[in-house]
């Protein structure tokens, strides 16, 4: 009799950098190299997978998730790319600084460039999700020569318009946890898991998303409400900055946007496409906010096609 | 869902749209008792795999996660069993006799010019009938892949079947849980039964899609066919079942989930003892292995077929 059970690679792959995370699931592929980048005393944990072909950096999203949000991309792209990803400060194996200034999007962008240095990546396609668009845009504005192409998934940029009902006061005592009232510092403090369930339930509007929601809530639980409050207080990019950087972008750009995105709303992705010269838009019909997790085959093939078109290898 | 009369027009099925692959050929095979069976042939490789349906509760789409992968390498034949899909839905219990189900495999193999095939089945409908055919017409069966090994009598049925099987025809004071395994409840709310049943036997987390699909296929069928089938009795005692199992000479692979809610793992263990066939136990898996664990199932089928090697070609 044979019992099929996946071996637990954690036993063979002890955590040797950063702080160990909560009970992590087994991975389809483990990094070939990992390390810590330290800037102003804040350490960020990065990983590299594969070592061939066009480098791709999977840019961290909001610190509510870890770099595992790219788990459905890493194993596929590592076969034919040098893949780099890292945990944003505030979650995963990266530090959790205790000032809002440390979570400034400008710091996140500098982390991105520092990780590229550490992983010996001169020039890469930057793939970002949601809030990660801020980091990608700022890094591109600061160092356009290091960006071979840009892919934005459900970009949470201050263009277009927000989804209805999200204009909730983050700081007021609302006395309710109904709907977007959960996006509130007091609500996070008294029921953080409830907020995560709400937020990721809205992130995955597609049916049959229980696994994706469960994963994402688990990543959210690797950090804590006080850290997340600091990330919300930290400055992002404003509309004028976003438009100015976008207008100067000269590299190939792909925006992948779910038309049922209930977090950022599809109009932000559409507006970013219009703001970037020559940007291509792929709309996922019925897709929600995190298409790389919920529609991995579709997203992976779209990114791979984009990568090949940059290399002049269009099949 | 209306039930077309025997010989009526083809039914529009739950998920006619969006197939990953289309058949090379589709047709209707006529069984020896005149029942029409809808079949499809995919791919052109060697050998031929016949995917036996779990009828009449669901139909050939239960193999949707196998057909695209396997048909790249092999020729794959699927068909709707009597009582569901594009096949006739007789309401005479004798149409659902064990012999008829076994005979339908031969009918479809003949109609598709399939001299010999690897048989792939799930539960009693697939596994037991494949074993019978291998025992009675060994020259037509190259091998068997048996998922959720359903061979009656080899071990006692699971307690919920034993308990509510006895009261199937009774008016029960409740329709909670397995009390839904009941003629009167089926007639009141067959959809409720289908959803309950597939939720119970697909108990792994994150199975909403597998449950929704299977419930839809059940609703493509007919409660009248299910009731007629429920009136047939299994025609073999334990000695006969064991003798038939022992007489199988073709290679077999048994695959069973440790958490199977429909067929006790004890049946798989016993069949492995009787036949010497290897048994793969899938940790944490329930009954619907090909639909819920398709990659694992597909690789097991592929490895089994490849292991037949020279015997096949």
Image: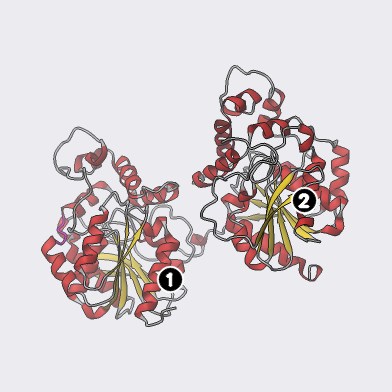
Question: A73 and B107: which one is in front?
Answer: B107
Camera-nearest label, 2 or 1: 2
Q: Which mark is residue B174?
A: none
Q: Is residue A92 left or right of residue A32?
A: left
Residue at the far left: name it: A240
Dot 2 falls on a residue whose secondary structure is helix
Residue A226 at x, y = what percent?
A: 22, 48
- Pinpoint the chain carrying mark 2: B
In this rendering, the count of numbered labels is 2
Q: Is residue A185 left or right of residue B159?
A: left
Same chain? Circles 2 and 1: no
Tell me the quarter of the image containing the C terminus of chain B: bottom right
Residue topped by disc 1: A77
Q: Is residue B29 left or right of residue B187?
A: right
Residue A146 at x, y = what percent?
A: 26, 79
Dot 1 falls on a residue whose secondary structure is helix
Label the magenta part by its dominant secondary structure: loop
Residue A189 at x, y = what percent?
A: 24, 41
- Does the image show residue B132? yes
Residue topped by disc 2: B105
Q: Say few, some or many: other residues with alpha carbon within 10 Å of mark 1 (under 14 / 14 to 19 / 20 or more).
A: many
Res. B32 image quadrant:
top right
Residue A167 at x, y = what percent?
A: 17, 45
- Pinpoint the chain carrying mark 1: A
Provide the residue span drawn in magenta. A234-238
- Picture layout, residue B62 above or below residue B89: below
Question: B239 and B142: which one is in front?
Answer: B142
Question: Disc 2 and disc 1: Cα gap in Å?
Answer: 43 Å
């Amino acid at each position: 009799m044979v019992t099929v059970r996946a071996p637990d690679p954690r036993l063979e792959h002890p955590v040797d950098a950063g702080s160990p995370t909560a009970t992590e699931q087994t991975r389809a592929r483990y990094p070939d190299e990992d390390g810590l980048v330290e800037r102003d005393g804040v350490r960020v944990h990065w990983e590299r997978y594969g070592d061939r072909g066009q480098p791709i950096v999977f840019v961290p999203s909001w610190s509510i998730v870890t770099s595992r949000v790219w788990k459905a991309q890493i194993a596929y792209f590592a076969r034919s790319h040098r893949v780099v990803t890292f945990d944003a400060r505030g979650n995963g194996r990266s530090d959790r600084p205790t000032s809002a200034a440390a979570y400034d999007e400008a710091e996140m962008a500098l982390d991105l460039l520092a990780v590229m240095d550490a992983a010996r990546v001169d020039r890469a396609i930057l793939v970002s999700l949601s809030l990660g668009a801020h980091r990608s845009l700022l890094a591109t504005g600061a160092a356009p020569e290091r960006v071979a192409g840009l892919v934005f998934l459900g970009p949470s940029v201050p263009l277009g318009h927000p989804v209805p009902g999200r204009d909730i006061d983050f700081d007021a005592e609302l006395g309710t946890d109904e709907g977007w009232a959960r996006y509130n510092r007091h609500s996070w403090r008294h029921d953080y898991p409830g907020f995560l369930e709400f937020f990721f339930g809205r992130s995955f509007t597609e049916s049959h998303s229980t696994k994706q929601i469960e994963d994402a809530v688990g990543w959210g639980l690797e950090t804590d409400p006080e850290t997340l409050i600091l990330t919300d207080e930290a400055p992002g990019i404003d509309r004028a900055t976003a438009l100015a950087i976008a207008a100067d972008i000269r590299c190939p750009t792909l925006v992948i946007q779910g038309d049922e995105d209930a977090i950022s709303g599809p109009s932000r992705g559409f507006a970013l496409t219009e703001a970037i010269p020559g940007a291509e838009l792929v709309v996922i019909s019925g897709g929600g906010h995190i298409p790389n997790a919920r529609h991995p085959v579709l997203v992976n093939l779209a990114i791979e096609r984009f990568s090949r078109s940059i290399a002049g290898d269009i099949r | 869902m209306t039930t077309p009369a025997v010989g009526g027009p083809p039914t529009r099925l739950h998920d006619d749209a969006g197939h990953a692959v289309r058949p090379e050929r589709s047709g209707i095979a006529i069984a020896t008792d005149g029942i029409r069976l809808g079949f499809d042939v995919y791919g052109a490789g060697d050998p031929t795999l016949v995917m036996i349906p779990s009828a009449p509760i669901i139909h050939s789409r239960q193999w949707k996660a196998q057909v695209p992968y396997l048909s790249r390498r092999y020729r794959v034949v699927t068909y709707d069993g009597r009582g569901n899909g594009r096949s006739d839905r007789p309401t005479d219990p004798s149409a659902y006799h064990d012999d008829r189900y076994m005979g339908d495999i031969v009918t479809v193999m003949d109609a598709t010019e399939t001299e010999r095939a690897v048989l792939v089945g799930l539960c009693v409908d697939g596994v037991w009938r494949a074993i019978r055919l291998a025992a009675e017409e060994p020259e037509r069966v190259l091998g068997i892949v048996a998922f959720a090994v359903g061979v009656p009598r080899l071990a006692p049925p699971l307690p919920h079947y034993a308990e509510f099987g006895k009261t199937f025809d009774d008016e029960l004071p409740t329709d909670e849980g397995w009390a839904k395994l009941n003629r009167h409840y089926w007639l009141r709310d067959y959809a409720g039964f289908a959803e309950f049943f597939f939720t119970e036997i697909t108990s792994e987390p994150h199975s909403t899609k597998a449950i929704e699909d299977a419930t839809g296929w059940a609703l493509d069928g007919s409660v009248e066919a299910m009731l007629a089938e429920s009136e047939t009795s299994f025609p073999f005692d334990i000695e006969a079942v064991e003798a038939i199992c022992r007489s199988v000479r073709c290679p077999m692979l048994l695959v069973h989930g440790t958490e199977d809610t429909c067929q006790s793992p004890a049946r798989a263990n016993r069949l492995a003892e009787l036949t010497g066939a290897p048994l793969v136990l899938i940790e944490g898996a329930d009954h619907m292995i090909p639909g819920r664990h398709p990659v694992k199932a597909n690789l097991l089928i592929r490895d089994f077929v490849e292991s037949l090697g020279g015997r096949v070609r």
